[in-house]
Amino acid sequence: MLEDESGRLRLTGSMLRNTQLCTGAIIAVLGTENANGDFEVIDTKVPDLPQQPRRWGSDTLDAPTGAMKGKIAFVSGLGITGTSSDTLALELLADYLLGYTGGASEGALPDASAITRLIIAGNSVGASMTTDVNADSATKKRTGPKKYGYDASAYNASPITRLDSFLAEILPSMPVTLMPGESDPANFSLPQQGIHRAMFPQARAYCAPPPAGEDKKEPGWFDSVTNPWEGDVEGWRLWGSSGQNVDDILRYLNFADEEGNVADGAGDSEARMRVMEAMLRWRCGVPTAPDTLWSYPFQTHDPFVIQTCPHIFFAGNQPQFKTAVIEGDAPLKLNGADTEMTGTDDDNTSGPRVRLLSIPKFKETGELTAISTSTVLLVPYSKWHVPRYHEWMKDEEIQEATASEPLSIEEEYAMQQSWRQDPDKLTFIVCLPSPSQTETSTPAIKDTDDASDRMVGDINLFLRVDDGEEGDAEPQIIGEIELMIAEKNNQRKGFGKAALNTFLRYIVDHEAEILDEFVSRDETAATALKGMEAVLKFACLSVKIGQANERSLALFEGAMFRKVAEEPNYFGEFELRREREALGREMVDVSLERAGVSGYVEVGYERVE
């Protein structure tokens, strides 16, 4: 349907089948009217990229060398809940931004001293656990009428307070631009107005003073801006959103890749790049508003129309990091992790040059941890482990022992992604100990430390909520452990005992983070646990072992797991549990010592997917 102020016209024609268009796209069509009164489309034309402004910094010919090499840091989806699970990730991010983690000369990330501004692209505040789990009890306590329709007991200030503290730590060293997102305390309809400075009692000291009269508002060291937002940073024109515009289009369209394969619009990063390219060429940043995305009804102008071409076009809260380049009419260039910007006045370019950025959710992709001990190394299950793991799972004995069906290599890669992303799963690959592991120094994990020839097995934790066989018992969280030492030549060497006790130590140390993520991202778990106490804990850790597997039974019984029943269940398995009282740190350390495991240390795992 073609629509403007004068009316609507139905469009038909085979060409439309090969053209990706969504509601709100700005186009011109060429064709003829057919006998049915419909418009038969022969060709379509989009506005394409508008004129791009010169970068004002490039006019400064006498600027010192390196003056134009500043970097802009982007982050989105901090997902702060106000719980202990936020602490480590935010501290690591702050340490990096403030330059406490070392420079590139140490083999670390690029030097943070070059960062001239931090842009936070929405969803800084996540779902609040405290409010959800106490909702029922709060309702029971407050039976009287609400004052002005507001129930103070339903409000949890800890997430925004933690965000304020994080910003106050960063702001003395670098300016920050904060955009609201879908989960932030701002209006829901687009364009979302900036989060009010009153929310930030510490950080608001860095805001610019309010404009007097009709004076234009000047940017401050701390800018709380709208979503979407258009602005200038270091001479670059930026246009970006917290990601609702991209997500909404991909609910209805699948964008094909360069080979014509239809991408999975829900999670494929290349599809998201092509959506962003289409929005730029349509000159509309939020085309689906207000039809399928709420927006404020403007009368005289459309704030989502892109009047000038940005140098950087970004979307936050995406599944993965991805970057691409548009140069005039040339096809989209998907050029990996290259994020260097060059001048836009190069005579070799045929038109505007735009860098597209898909910014992932920091809450989900911010940090990976490996666990190193004197006996084993546990690393997150990653795609480079899949080929060796796939070979293991072809063994019929392993299939029988793990109750698994053989999978194709493609299915194995999909399963690996599930194990890494699903909130009810935690998995590590068990490897030979790192050669750099010593009693006196922290090991530096190298890419070769978890190579295929050093893999010996895997260990997993599956989380579930148990409310009894009849569903009438008080719900409790149970973590079920699975352990596999795959090849026979690595069995009976103590790897299983070391991996199990190391894994138990990790679970106990990170119990709050593991359970916070489980309840915040798993709707079934959140619903089942609603109304329980705010402090989430494991009721027990469990394992199910076939009655004929005497070695595994002995291994877990030696780690303080006890049989639930003296007879196996219908499937011929014994369930063993390590109860809550045996999950204290001191008791776990005793188990580690008895297993002969020393030198436990958690180190950053920096291999990139």
Image (cartoon, helix red, strand yellow):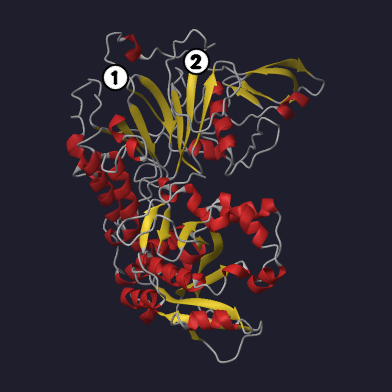
Total labels: the figure holds 2
Position of 102 compared to 435: left or right? left
| Corner quadrant of residue 571 | bottom right
Q: Kindly tell me whether residue 404 is visible in this rendering.
A: yes
Do callouts 2 and 1 mark residues in contact (Cβ within 8 Å)? Answer: no
- Residue at far bottom of view: 566
Residue 455 in the image, given as x and y percentages of width and height: 55, 59
Position of 396 compared to 530: left or right? right
Q: Is residue 183 above or below residue 192?
A: below
Q: Which residue is mark 2?
A: 352
Kindly identify the amino acid type of the residue bearing the numbered disc 1.
Answer: Ala
The quadrant of the rendering that contains the N terminus is top right
Q: Residue at x 71, y 32 (%)?
A: 260
- Which element is circle 2 on? loop
Residue 13 in the image, given as x and y percentages of width and height: 77, 24
Return the mark for residue 135.
none
Relative depth, front residue between 109 and 285: 109
Q: Which residue is mark 1?
A: 67
Crowding at dot 2, Cα within 10 Å, few <14 / some 14-19 / many 20+, comes out as many
Residue 401 in the image, given as x and y percentages of width and height: 65, 73
Q: Residue at x 51, y 38 (%)?
A: 293
